[in-house]
Image (tube, rainbow, N blue to C red):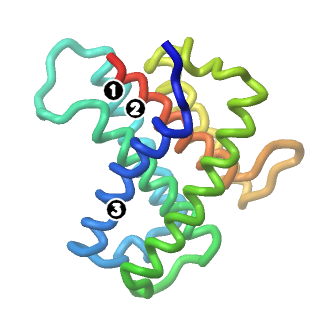
Amino acid sequence: MAFNTSIQYDSITLICRDLFVKKMKDYGSAWRILRLSSLTDQIFIKAQRIRSLQTKKIRKVDEGQSSEFIGIINYSIMSLIQIEKGIVESPDLNSEEALELYNSHLLETKTLMENKNHDYGEAWRDMRVSSLTDLILQKILRIKQIEDNQGKTLVSEGIDANYQDMINYSVFALIHLQDN
């Protein structure tokens, strides 16, 4: 069966973008006051919940992994926007500006995925969703360490590259979940 990763990617991220737009209508850009460490912690909570759903037999809240992966994607894009624009004391973006920034970071992240996917030969298709979850948790721990180092790295990618990887791993996981 032939897959078109780019089309699948766009299908998944359309769902994420739609939720982002609806939440902007409900809440505005209140998220603009969040420090990167707060956004990282939100992503951590979502990734931990996914891991818990993957390992526990009993669920007390009727939401699955998909909604959490969507949350990781949207919080990661918000983080990339915060890196670009800086943190503010009060909401400062209207829906159109926020969506323009969202789309810009998503396009940059998709381009990164396409380049890596070409070089890796779609290896992610043979990975388990649980492995993608573990990689996301590892990226979060890396980000926390970089944050503790005041954003400085000696030889490693910066925080932004880790957020982009988490977006791409989450999209891959959602494609897997959709295909099953």
Q: Which residue is drawn at 74% across and 52% down?
A: 158
Q: Residue at x 42, y 54 (%)?
A: 74
Residue on which disc 1 sits? 178
Mark 2: few/some/many CA within 10 Å (<14, 14-19, 20+): many
Q: Find residue 19 and report its image quarter.
A: bottom left
Q: Find residue 169 and report its image quarter.
A: top right
Residue 65 against residue 102 in the figure, above or below: above
Return the disc, 3 or 2, that comes first in the chain's sequence: 3
The residues bearing labels 3 and 1 have C-alpha atoms spaced at a distance of 20 Å
Return the disc, 3 or 1, that comes first in the chain's sequence: 3
Find out whether the residues at labels 1 and 2 contact each other: C-beta distance under 8 Å. yes
Residue 48 against residue 43 in the figure, above or below: above
SS at badge 1: helix
Percent x, y of residue 122: 64, 22
Residue on which disc 3 sits? 20
Mark 3: few/some/many CA within 10 Å (<14, 14-19, 20+): many
Residue 114 against residue 4 in the figure, above or below: below
Residue on which disc 2 sits? 174
Percent x, y of residue 33: 43, 76
SS at badge 2: helix
Q: Residue furthest front?
A: 2
Q: Nearer the viewer, residue 96 or 136?
A: 96
Q: What amino acid is found at the position of numbered circle 1 in the picture?
A: Gln
Percent x, y of residue 36: 54, 62
Q: What amino acid is found at the position of numbered circle 3 in the picture?
A: Phe
Q: Nearer the viewer, residue 165 or 17?
A: 17
Q: Nearer the viewer, residue 121 or 63?
A: 121
Mark 3 vs mark 1: give the one in front. 1
Q: Which image quarter is the C terminus in?
A: top left
